[in-house]
């Protein structure tokens, strides 16, 4: 199974990267942008999707500073097109 | 006494740490892929970019073969010092509380800073007095110490904060100006500043030697005695 793991900085932790992006957008004329946070996307093929939460807790993220969310997808085909992506489902 | 300095792929301060430790005792390099601590009395996890900092700083290195031995050594009370990337590795391994995040400036910083000794006792700062100011360089992009507020309160109450950046010297936005923190038992210590780069007046300061001297005195009194 193809899976995507979305990793975000935990709410409440200062995110200077998000702030830098938030400041940069108005400089390009994009107004009205708030609450920007920059995280990471990890894509992987897994035989056993049930193991994904343990992978997230042990290696893919640091749960002290990051939240994660697993976005599952039946085949690789539906990944790579934002139009076809399913809405992420909170995993925890 | 004998220090062992871990060398990961991507370590870059291993040789400076080796030479700094050699000023106060014997020192050997420990290869990351070996399950062998060579009978050392103290382990130093040095600075650098272990495993390319892939995924997160320290995240891959904490699973290196040698780290299984380092964790067991720490559980048995052995002294483990993590400097910069070594601090990040020990946090990822759960041997130290908290985590290190990207500097608030988002920039790599490389400068001499003053740190204040919070506790002039124990295995890592025993050769100092509380309130001493040490001049030691920092050089990192990911050095902002973070722990949840309640955990910070607990660390301070338990005396686990050993070093703070002096007023005006916090280079990275570390919470409560924390520069170095130990585990509850006091035998594992991590700090972002580089004491191994401050061991000779030729390069501006020899204050970093105090950390290594503290470790030697502790081992001589409590391990080798």
Image (spheres, helix red, strand yellow):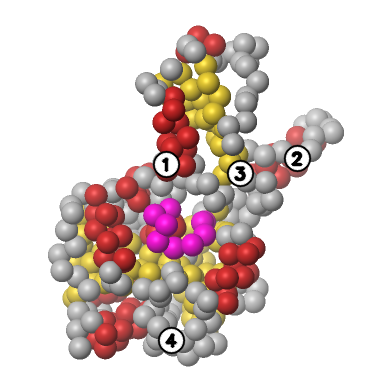
Q: Measure the C-alpha gap from mark 2 to mark 1.
A: 27 Å
In the image, which is nearer the foreground, mark 2 or mark 4? 4
Residue, disc 3: A9
Which residue occupies 46% across, 18% down? Answer: A2
Residue nearer the viewer, A34 or B22:
A34
Dots 3 and 4 on the same chain = no
Q: Which mark is residue B201?
A: none
Is residue A28 visible in this depiction of the protein?
yes
Q: Read off the chain for label 3.
A: A
Q: Is residue A76 left or right of residue A6?
A: left
Q: Position of residue A7 (x, y in %)?
A: 56, 36
Q: Is residue B2 left or right of residue B184?
A: left
The secondary structure type at the circle numbered 2 is loop
Q: Which mark is residue A35?
A: 2
Residue, disc 4: B121
Q: Are marks 2 and 3 in contact (CB under 8 Å)?
A: no
Q: Measure the C-alpha gap from mark 2 to mark 4.
A: 44 Å
Residue, disc 1: A59
Quadrant assignment for the N terminus of chain B: bottom left
Q: Is residue B145 left or right of residue A26?
A: left
Q: Residues within 10 Å of mark 3 (few under 14, many from 20)?
A: many
């Amino acid at each position: 199974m193809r899976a995507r793991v979305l990793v975000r900085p935990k709410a409440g932790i200062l995110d200077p990267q998000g702030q830098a992006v938030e400041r940069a957008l108005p400089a390009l004329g994009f107004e009205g942008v708030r609450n920007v946070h920059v995280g990471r996307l990890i894509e992987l093929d897994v035989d056993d999707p049930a193991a994904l939460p343990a992978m997230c807790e042990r290696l893919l993220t640091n749960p002290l500073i990051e939240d994660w969310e697993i976005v599952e997808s039946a085949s690789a085909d539906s990944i790579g097109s934002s139009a076809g992506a399913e809405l992420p489902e909170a995993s925890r | 006494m004998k220090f062992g300095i871990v060398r990961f792929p991507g370590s870059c301060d291993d040789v400076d740490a080796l030479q700094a430790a050699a000023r106060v005792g014997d020192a050997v390099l420990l290869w990351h892929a070996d399950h062998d601590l060579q009978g050392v009395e103290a382990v130093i996890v040095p600075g650098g970019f272990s495993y390319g900092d892939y995924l997160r700083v320290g995240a891959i290195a904490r699973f290196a073969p040698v780290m299984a031995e380092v964790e067991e050594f720490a559980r048995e009370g052995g002294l483990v010092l993590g400097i910069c990337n070594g601090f990040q590795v020990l946090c990822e391994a759960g041997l130290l509380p908290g985590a290190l995040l990207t500097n608030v400036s988002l920039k790599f910083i490389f400068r001499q800073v003053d740190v204040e000794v919070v506790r002039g006792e124990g295995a890592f700062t025993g050769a100092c007095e509380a309130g001493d100011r040490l001049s030691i360089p920092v050089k990192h992009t990911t050095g902002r110490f973070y722990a949840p507020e309640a955990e910070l309160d607990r660390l301070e109450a338990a005396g686990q904060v050993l070093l703070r950046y002096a007023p005006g010297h916090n280079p990275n936005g570390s919470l409560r100006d924390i520069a170095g923190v130990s585990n509850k038992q006091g035998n594992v210590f991590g700090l972002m500043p580089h004491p191994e780069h401050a061991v000779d007046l030729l390069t501006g300061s020899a204050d970093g030697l105090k950390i290594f001297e503290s470790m030697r005195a502790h081992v001589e009194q409590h391990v080798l005695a």
